[in-house]
Amino acid sequence: MKMKIRVCQGVGGIIVITMVTSLMIVYNSSSTNRSSSSLSSRRLDALVPATKRPGRNATSVLQGYAGVMDHKPLKMHCRTCALVTSSGQLTGSMRGEEIDRSECVIRMNDAPSTEYQKDVGRRTNLRVVAHSSLQRVLRSRQELLNGSQDAVFIFWGPSNCMRRDGKGHVFNSLRLLNQLLPKLKIYIITRIKMLKFDELFKKETGIDRKSSNSWLSTGWFTMAIALELCDGINVYGMVPPNFCRSSSHPTVPYHYYEPLGPDECSMYLSHERSQRGSHHRFITEKRVFSNWARTLNIHFYQPDWNPAAVIYSENSSYSTVPAGS
């Protein structure tokens, strides 16, 4: 816990300095020409309420996402969502126009679109950001902040970073950011909601996140948020759970915007196998998403694949069952 606090303090200090020295420039140069059946399952009862969505022009109130300035819940609803991953699978995909036809486009962390529009689209309605990615978002402020002031930003992080009593360094930085750019729609995931995400992960996998030294990925939060927000989800760039186990899988970068970065499957496998230190369970999460897609309106593109059910045992081993069985 002491290590986490130090990390948050270090990140918070760097962020405050960055914002104080540069965000006023961003604010002054802000563009004036900015574009403007419920999903429920018994698996998601701990997180997604089994209530009927409002009409097509109505707005849902999503509890557990609090505005950093007014602490009010998020009001948002989309009929169709394109959930765009940051995967190198999207490079050369030419999916941009298809993605932009969705009512809402969801992106993660600091993934850019400006130089990659043909593959990933140009629009952003929601961006889900890890506390550790805030500094990178600020570095890309011209596009991600100035160019997306109509978008909603949801930040997640451990409670010691996000607490609202003056001691949450990341939360304090977000408030300062919102004061400098008051048109930004910035929300955090509340502590109670974060605990529900942990409960959902354990319910789906049998793995206790804390005792296994696992961190839920931004992809986990983004998919779960999309289930509350969207009537239908088209996911772009997410591989199936067994993809990296094949010796013939193509080699692509972990991020489409970092072509010289680490290999995607190497990243997934190293985290999945890790037993020491903090790590993500990328492949385990994808098994859960595959299961959800069997009963919910979720579809996967680039690569295009259909889900297979995954059955977990008490020791977290698994087997696949063909879709439709």
Image (tube, rainbow, N blue to C red):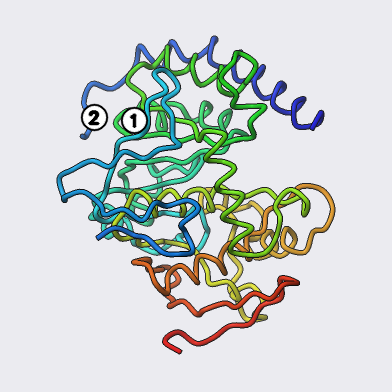
Which amino acid type corresponds to the residue marked 1 in the rendered image? Answer: Gly
197 with respect to 2 (left or right) = left
| Residue 265 occupies quadrant | bottom right
Image vertical order of residue 170 relative to residue 277, above or below = above
**Percent x, y of residue 320:** 58, 83
Residue denoted by label 2: 34
247 with respect to 237 (left or right) = right
Residue drawn 52% across the image and 57% down it: 87
Residue denoted by label 1: 147
**Percent x, y of residue 195:** 59, 43
Q: Secondary structure at mark 2?
A: loop
- Residue at the far right in the pictured view: 276
| Residue 281 occupies quadrant | bottom right
| Residue 2 occupies quadrant | top right
Q: Secondary structure at mark 1?
A: helix
Residue drawn 69% across the image and 26% down it: 8
Q: Which mark is residue 230?
A: none
Which amino acid type corresponds to the residue marked 2 in the rendered image? Answer: Arg
71 with respect to 288 (left or right) = left
**Percent x, y of residue 215:** 67, 48
Q: Determine contact: label 1, label 2, CB under 8 Å.
A: yes
- The residue lying toward the viewer, choosing from 83 and 262, is 83
The quadrant of the image that shows the N terminus is top right
Image vertical order of residue 297 relative to residue 55, above or below = below
